[in-house]
Amino acid sequence: MPILRLIANVDLTREQEHVLELAFNHALCKLDVVDRSDPICDLLAKRMIDIHMRGVTDAVALAEITVREIRAPKQ
């Protein structure tokens, strides 16, 4: 799972890791991603970690914001 691999080198508490895992799984469901080797998983995980580091700590909010940013057209 990409999120676990990517957060291994980030200084997080167990609770923060758990929140990221929950948010990641929720976001994958919202995006209908089943294949964990899909490149979107890495993009999703990296974006989610960035958003979390900006202060979003609620799993549902983190998933929603990440999905919204991934789906947003580039300007």
Image (spheres, grey):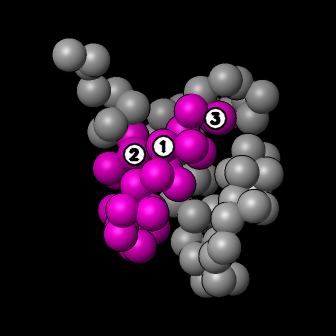
Please indicate, yes or no, whether residue 26 appears anywhere in the rendered image.
no
- 10 Å neighbourhood of mark 2: few (<14), some, or many (≥20)? many
Q: Residues within 10 Å of mark 3 (few under 14, many from 20)?
A: many
* Label 2, label 3: how far apart the Cα atoms are: 12 Å
Q: Residue most toward the left?
A: 75
Tell me if residue 2 is in the magenta stretch. Answer: no
Residue 72 occupies quadrant: top left
Label 2 close to label 1 by CB (< 8 Å): yes
Q: CA distance from mark 2 to mark 1?
A: 6 Å
Q: Which residue is mark 3?
A: 41
Mark 2: amino acid: Thr
Secondary element type, mark 2 = helix
Q: Secondary structure at mark 3?
A: helix
What label sits on residue 66 in the rendered view? Answer: 2
- What residue do we see at 44% from left, 62% from top? 52
- Determine if the magenta segment contains residue 45: yes
Nearest the viewer among 19 and 50 is 50
The answer to which of marks 2 and 3 sits earlier in the sequence is 3
Image: 69 above or below 9:
above
Name the main secondary structure of what is drawn in magenta: helix
Magenta range:
41-67
Q: Earlier in the sequence, mark 3 or mark 1?
A: 3
Identify the residue at image location x=54%, y=39%. 44
| Callout 1 amino acid | Arg
Left or right of 42? Residue 73 is left
